[in-house]
Amino acid sequence: MVTFVDGPVRVSVPATSANLGPGFDSLGLALSLRDELEAEVTGSGLAVEVEGAGSWSVPLDESHLVVRSMRAAFEAMGARPPGLRLSCSNVIPHARGLGSSSAAIVAGVSLARGLVAGGSLLVSDEALFDLAARIEGHPDNVAPAFYGGFAISGRDDDGFYAVGSAVDPRVGAVVFVPPNPVATEVARGLLPAEVPHADAAADAGRTALLVAALAGQPEQLFRATRDFLHQDYRRAAMPESLALVDTLRADRVAAVVSGAGPTVLAFADGPGAAAAEPDRLLARCPDGWLAYHLAVDREGVRLA
């Protein structure tokens, strides 16, 4: 019989940036911007509290993405809590290409496992990652949110997979977050069904180079982040974002659209390196946008 732990369980989960230019639907990086959540089993009902990003727009009932993810994980463990209380403190911007939905899903399945006594024996990390990826529908943000760091992920006949890869400690990022969201469905709907073979081949080469550049040759990041498959096709949905990418890249800054956008990510020196480059980038934030200098988050989801 499944039993529940006494008292609340807390998790924090990082923002993520997928694609990173050429790594469409396959590369993702965890960033040091974290949502914090707390949940506990109660006698009955459901109570959801949200503060911070998205608090004015997300539902506070069973349709809340964290709650739906918790329910899916409880079902996988054969657990039926009589009631739930969930509290979310969000800092990851919603619908901006920084993995807010993946963070919610990863947090939800992790909270549910943490609330079940011996939950890690009932559902392994691999199984929990697979469940999160199935809820999201793709693993490129889920993988770094779950495992941390830089992840190469995908799906084959054996299911979803994620493989971690090294990130040079000199690598950090500046993200430029515009005030208005763009729905992932809208951005994805602008992509063509077919692309030229030459573009696909060029993108494959840059993706391979990007893995090497992040691992230990950051001087190659500008060349490695050139995309041929998706960013220009999405320009109509986020013209200001692509204009910023163009401007930064004209100055040989390794800038890309983060995920489906509209946030722009520019690779920069990490916090342990000289601060001149990040400061120079932060000063280029457009009016009305927010800019953050972030480190690569090495931990992924963390149970408090």
Image: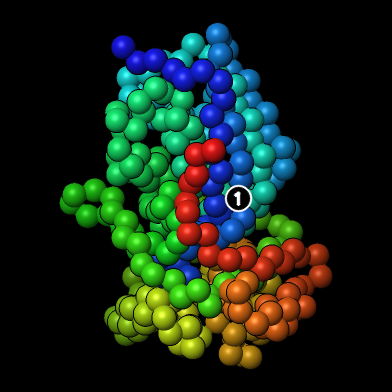
Q: Is residue 107 left or right of residue 245?
A: left
Q: Is residue 147 left or right of residue 180?
A: left
Q: How many marks?
A: 1
Q: Residue at x 41, y 52 (%)?
A: 147
- Of all residues, the one furthest to the front in this rendering is 272
Q: Residue at x 39, y 22 (%)?
A: 117
- Of all residues, the one furthest to the left in this rendering is 157
Front-most of residues 1 and 187: 1
Q: Position of residue 107 (x, y in %)?
A: 50, 39
Q: Position of residue 113 (x, y in %)?
A: 41, 30
In this rendering, does residue 199 appear at all? no
Q: Position of residue 4 (x, y in %)?
A: 44, 17
Q: Position of residue 115 (x, y in %)?
A: 46, 25
Quadrant location of the C terminus? Answer: top right
Q: Quadrant of residue 273?
A: bottom right
Q: Is residue 106 above or below residue 14?
A: above
Front-most of residues 275 and 234: 275
Element on which disc 1 rests? strand
- Of all residues, the one furthest to the right in this rendering is 287
Q: Residue at x 56, y 54 (%)?
A: 15
Front-most of residues 294 and 283: 294
In this rendering, does residue 1 appear at all? yes
Q: Is residue 21 left or right of residue 238?
A: left
Q: Quadrant of residue 122?
A: top left
Colour mode? rainbow
What type is the residue that disc 1 sits on?
A: Arg
Quickly name the residue at label 1: 34
Q: Is residue 144 above or below residue 286?
A: above
Front-most of residues 232 and 268: 268
Q: Quadrant of residue 53?
A: top right
Q: Residue at x 48, y 83 (%)?
A: 218
Quadrant location of the N terminus? Answer: top left
